[in-house]
Image (cartoon, helix red, strand yellow):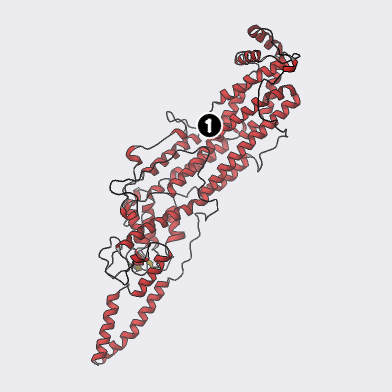
Amino acid sequence: MGVLWTNCLFLLACCCGSGLGSPNKCDEVRKVFQLRQIGPNQLLPLSPRPGSDLQVCTSKNLTCCTKKMEEKYQVAARRDIQNLLQTSSSSLKFLISRNVAAFQESFEVLMRQAENHTNAVLQESYPSVADQAMGAMWELFTDIGLFLLGSELNVDELVQRFFDALFPVVYNHLVNPGLSDISPSYAECVRSLSRDVRPFGGAPGLLADQIARSGVSGKLLLQAMHLGIEVINTTDHLQLSRECRRALLKMHYCPHCQGLTQSKPCMGYCLNVMRGCLASMAEIDTHWREFVRSLEGLSARMHGSQDLEQVLLGVHTLLHDAVGHAQKNGPRLSAQVHKLCGPPSRKQPAQSVSLQHSSRESIPLKSPVRVSGGSLAVRRRDFLNSLRLYRTYYGGLADQLCVSELASGDGLSCWNGTEIVKSYTLRVVGNGIKAQSANPEVKVKGADPVINQIIDKLKHINQLLQGKSIPKLGSLDQIETGSGDVEGRYSGDCDDEDGCDGSGGGEVKRKVSRVSKLNPDVTSDHKHHHHYHHPPVKDSEMEGRSRSLRLTGAIWILVLPCLHMFLAL
């Protein structure tokens, strides 16, 4: 009888003292630690141990974690969240970057089509003029293309430069034709008179105005799309505060220290942690919604004189009429030129050469066709219809990550930051900086300065998209917001537990880059990842929970005979 009592007491002592840190639990922790490549297995204890040295994953029970493991878990938790952010935004980023490339390609194709068609029309009506004006025509459309893709060119000047070069050709062949071409020096004199004698009437001003109106809209559309990519790049690599990093560790990996490798956080707990960590990002929501609306407004205005496709494919008509105007006013122009340049000085017929030299080969003449893949208007409409689905992206991101990826399903037991429970009982706060003052899980000190910079850029581009003038700010790519302390790291300090480079006073500096004009960062790959509107993930029964139930049953089988014997005494 004494031996039986001794065995029973030993079993009870083992059951009460082991807690959740039994050796088989630590074996499971070891497997997951290795599978997720969190760190070297040498960091794990051989058996459950007191966790008095742990800073975040504290527990009254024995633990499967060491301080070094805790540091590795914190780095892993941050990496997991950043991977989730990048995966969630990947389809949005791909949508914008793909359309940036498509619009740029469409602009370039449109330039060449408009150039070819204009040459073809001139060739049919004024063949002698068309042949010698081909080089100037190529330069005109090339400059227009560069303007659309971001170059700071003066549209009035580039258009007038084209008509200046065209005047000697028109004068030579239509106004005062001769047996041979005018000499280069005389041609230069004629060219210099173009802006004074106005041989083409109001055509240069009209064309410059049309290109400026339609081109600025197209250029602004591209700049806005580049900024959209920059916003996503910035939020994809958001630097998390110290408080957030500790909260993520507690939510994701502290259960592992108790052997609960399959547990998931309660929904309310997850929302508090993620809304706290992404509070600054939620502040983008209002401005991102306005960004999408402003793009739609700009697109709606891009018709008639602001329809780039219509303007460029109509250049041939304006140019044909301009040459006809000069021919009609030939006597007046001839008299003015004769008065200021003297009688025409001509070359010998055999030495006749084009006034506009160009090493470029003749452009194959084509009939006018629309831009391949549909018109620019159709492409804009399709893009904005897709972008509209993402207008609430930043406002609902924290909630979506919890619902789709992180939190336990309804009715299932879950981790509340300390233990496995049926439900989370603390208050759940809302989204945004102000709401975090009552957050029980994450202390938020203030807005991230880098997020504030990107919000400033969104405010600026929204005003430009809406047609509002922004005095003293210059063009979008010239704005460099943030300097000095504002460039500094987030208020959450970068410390050794993050694995940050450097030590002591070393700071991780971040700066919002300029809006790229021609080469958006299209990121690692162009594959469609999951849209951020994921359906809720179906939760399976946790393996650890069922194993715990089996262990409890075995303990009762051993203990019940002891209790029965005690009651029989």
Q: Quadrant of residue 211?
A: top right
Write the residue at 74% across / 22% down.
Answer: 128
Q: Is residue 126 visible?
A: no
Q: Decide: few, some or many residues near mark 1? Use Cα within 10 Å; few <14, some 14-19, many ≥20.
A: some
Q: Quadrant of residue 185?
A: top right
The relative height of residue 444 versus residue 61 in the rendered view (above or below) is: above
Q: Quadrant of the C terminus?
A: bottom left
State how many labels appear: 1
Please state the horizontal and vertical placement of residue 475, each as a whole percent of the image. 47, 32
Q: Nearer the viewer, residue 538 or 208?
A: 208
| Residue 31 at x, y percent in the picture | 41, 69
Q: Position of residue 10 (x, y in %)?
A: 26, 83
Where is residue 231 drawn, in percent x and y? Answer: 45, 44
Give the secondary structure at mark 1. Answer: loop
Q: Is residue 356 left or right of residue 553?
A: right
Nearer to us in this view, 404 or 194: 194
The kind of residue on which mark 1 rests is: Ser
Residue located beneath label 1 in the image: 151
Q: Nearer the viewer, residue 3 or 466?
A: 3
- Quadrant location of the N terminus? bottom left
Q: Where is 348 relative to 49, above or below?
A: above
The reply to whether residue 391 is visible in this rendering is yes
